[in-house]
Image: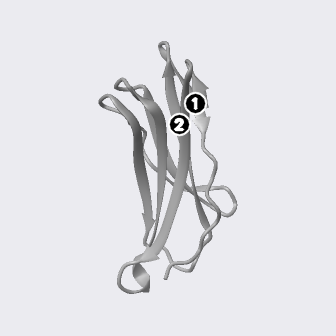
Amino acid sequence: MTVDSEDFTAFNTLYTGREGNDAHKFARGYIDIDTYYNQPANKMGVQPVIYNNSDIAVVTGNWYYNTSNVSGMSHSVTLSGFSGSPYLKAKGNIKIKYSNFYINYSSNATILLNDYS
């Protein structure tokens, strides 16, 4: 995506696994955004989301904004305490500031995963 002649790249990552016994399964979804040049504070915002295989958001993270001059940022949200082996995917929302307003984007989703070993 290009905003104000700056190219931004966004991607998602989903990690699944378990800690200890079967009752501690988890899924952690990340949203990352990168650009070549440092961006001023509050220029970029990300919101991580984990969806089920029916495209329903099962956990939505808060919005996070860069608080200093950076060229990228990453945030995550975690889902835990569930039973079975649901298929899940990570997808995120992005805001890039242009002038005095934000332009909203959605990032591409990861593939569906259900391996919690």
Residue type beneath disc 2: Ile
The mark nearer the N terminus, 2 or 1, is 2
Residue 110: image x %, image y %?
Answer: 61, 58
Residue type beneath disc 1: Asn
Nearest the camera: 115 or 83? 115
Nearest the camera: 81 or 106? 106
Nearest the camera: 32 or 53? 32
Give the CA distance from mark 2 to mark 1.
6 Å
Tally the numbered discs. Answer: 2
From this view, report whether residue 8 is shown above or below residue 29: above
User: Which residue corresponds to the image point at 46% horizontal and 75% vertical from the top-left?
Assistant: 17
From this view, report whether residue 41 is shown above or below residue 51: above
In the picture, which quadrant includes the N terminus?
A: top right
From this view, report whether residue 93 is shown above or below residue 20: above
| Local SS, label 2 | strand
Q: Which residue is mark 1?
A: 104
On residue 94, the disc is 2
Callout 1: 10 Å neighbours few (<14), some, many (20+)? few
User: Which residue corresponds to the image point at 55% horizontal and 39% vertical from the top-left?
Assistant: 9
